[in-house]
């Protein structure tokens, strides 16, 4: 026989504390006026009874919760695991929990939006997905601020915080040319994202100016994608003097494919990645890479969201933060 747990209500706490139910509500409502004597009586009674306020119910009344939504697709990419961990820590410091929404598609679907709206999220961070204008309007209608993180909104209607991918890829091209590279390969990721477009544009711009030969392979920002793409390149008989791989996890896959074919790095070819994930510094790889300034990017994102939660304006900007080259043993 199952035993139903008795639900302790605010009314129970009020009776034990000898105060009104509205006084109990004010104690748990941030910013509400309540005397220290009443606050102590309520908290003592709540502790004795094991009472916890229903945060979700309160969000229905205030039309806003202490929850920030984070939408992510690339959960297999260690870069986004690091990003999620840091967002969680900072939002927690500011009194917010995270509602993690995994999207199966490159573009956010209506069902993802419904999940976020149903929880009355205070704000939303979209990390590696795109969004149609019609879907995005749902957030605007509800005065919910939204930030695209590590990419730009292709419709230009939402705040974006990202690394300066154009300058980064230009710098990588110049760096590899300074190392004596004469034939290069770019392995890029999902070709319709702003990050891929800009990393390719900046890299190729410099090579075109210098009239250097190069070849582009499209992959998918995964280890397996980097490995298979490098294997295809080698099977085609192509071994460039340098590879720029548009993110680190693909670069590690490409390195393992090169090693399987007994290609020496950096003696036979050089490899540069992008992100500076923790694995890039592992002794097995020691990958030269472009470090994304995650801390600064997250700080800009959180600062915007908290300001908009306090006083919604709907104003948006595109903020690009400069990164830096981290030189290791693959070049």
Image (cartoon, rainbow, N blue to C red):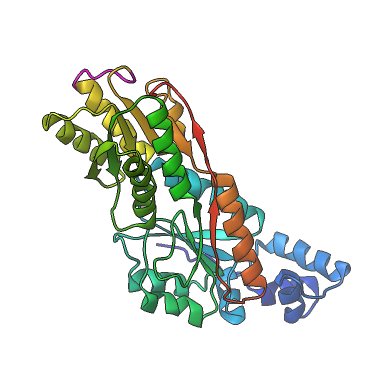
| 288 shown above or below 89 | above
Q: Is residue 112 visible?
A: yes
The stretch of residues the image draws in magenta is: 261-266
Q: In x, y percent, where is residue 78?
A: 41, 41
Left or right of 328 in this view: 232: left
| 183 shown above or below 59 | above
Q: In what quadrant of the picture does the C terminus appear?
A: top left
Residue 55 among magenta residues: no
Front residue of this view, candidates 143 and 184: 184
Give the number of callouts. 0
Residue in the picture at 58% in, 70% down: 65
Q: In x, y percent, where is residue 15?
A: 74, 76
Front residue of this view, candidates 5 and 265: 265
Residue in the picture at 37% in, 43% down: 203
Q: Is residue 275 visible?
A: no
Front residue of this view, candidates 184 and 105: 184
- When asked about the image quadrant of residue 212, the answer is top left
- When asked about the image quadrant of residue 255, the answer is top left
Q: In x, y percent, where is residue 87?
A: 55, 52
Front residue of this view, candidates 159 and 49: 159
Left or right of 228 in this view: 118: right
Residue in the picture at 60% in, 81% down: 61
Residue in the picture at 37% in, 41% down: 247
Q: In x, y percent, where is residue 100?
A: 45, 58
User: Secondary structure of the magenta portion, mostly?
Assistant: loop
Residue 263 among magenta residues: yes
Q: In what quadrant of the picture does the N terminus appear?
A: bottom left
């Amino acid at each position: 026989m199952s035993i139903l747990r008795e639900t302790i209500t605010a009314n129970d706490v009020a009776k034990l504390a000898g105060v009104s139910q509205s006084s109990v509500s004010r104690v748990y409502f941030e910013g509400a006026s309540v005397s220290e004597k009443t606050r102590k009586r309520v908290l003592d009674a709540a502790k004795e009874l094991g009472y916890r306020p229903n945060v979700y119910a309160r969000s229905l009344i205030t039309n806003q919760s202490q929850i920030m939504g984070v939408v992510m697709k690339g959960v297999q990419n260690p870069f986004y695991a690091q990003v999620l961990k840091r967002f969680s820590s900072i939002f927690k410091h500011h009194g917010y929990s995270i509602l993690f929404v995994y999207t199966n598609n490159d573009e956010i679907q209506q069902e993802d939006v419904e999940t976020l709206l149903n929880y009355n999220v205070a704000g939303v961070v979209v990390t590696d997905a795109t969004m149609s204008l019609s879907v995005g309007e749902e957030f605007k209608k509800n005065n919910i601020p939204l930030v695209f993180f590590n990419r730009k909104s292709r419709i230009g209607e939402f705040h974006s915080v990202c690394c300066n991918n154009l300058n980064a890829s230009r710098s990588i091209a110049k760096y590899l040319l300074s190392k004596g590279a004469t034939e290069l390969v770019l392995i890029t990721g999902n070709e319709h994202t702003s990050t891929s477009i800009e990393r390719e544009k900046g890299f190729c711009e410099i090579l075109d100016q210098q009239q250097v030969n190069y070849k582009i392979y499209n992959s998918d920002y995964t280890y397996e994608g980097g490995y298979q793409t490098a294997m295809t390149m080698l099977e085609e008989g192509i071994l460039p003097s340098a590879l720029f791989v548009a993110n680190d996890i693909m670069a590690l896959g490409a390195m393992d494919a090169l090693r399987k074919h007994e290609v020496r790095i950096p003696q036979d070819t050089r490899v540069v990645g992008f992100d500076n994930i923790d694995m890039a510094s592992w002794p097995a790889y020691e990958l030269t890479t472009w470090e994304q300034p995650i801390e600064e990017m997250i700080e800009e994102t959180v600062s915007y969201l908290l300001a908009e939660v306090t006083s919604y304006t709907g104003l948006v900007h595109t903020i690009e933060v400069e990164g830096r080259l981290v030189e290791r043993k693959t070049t």
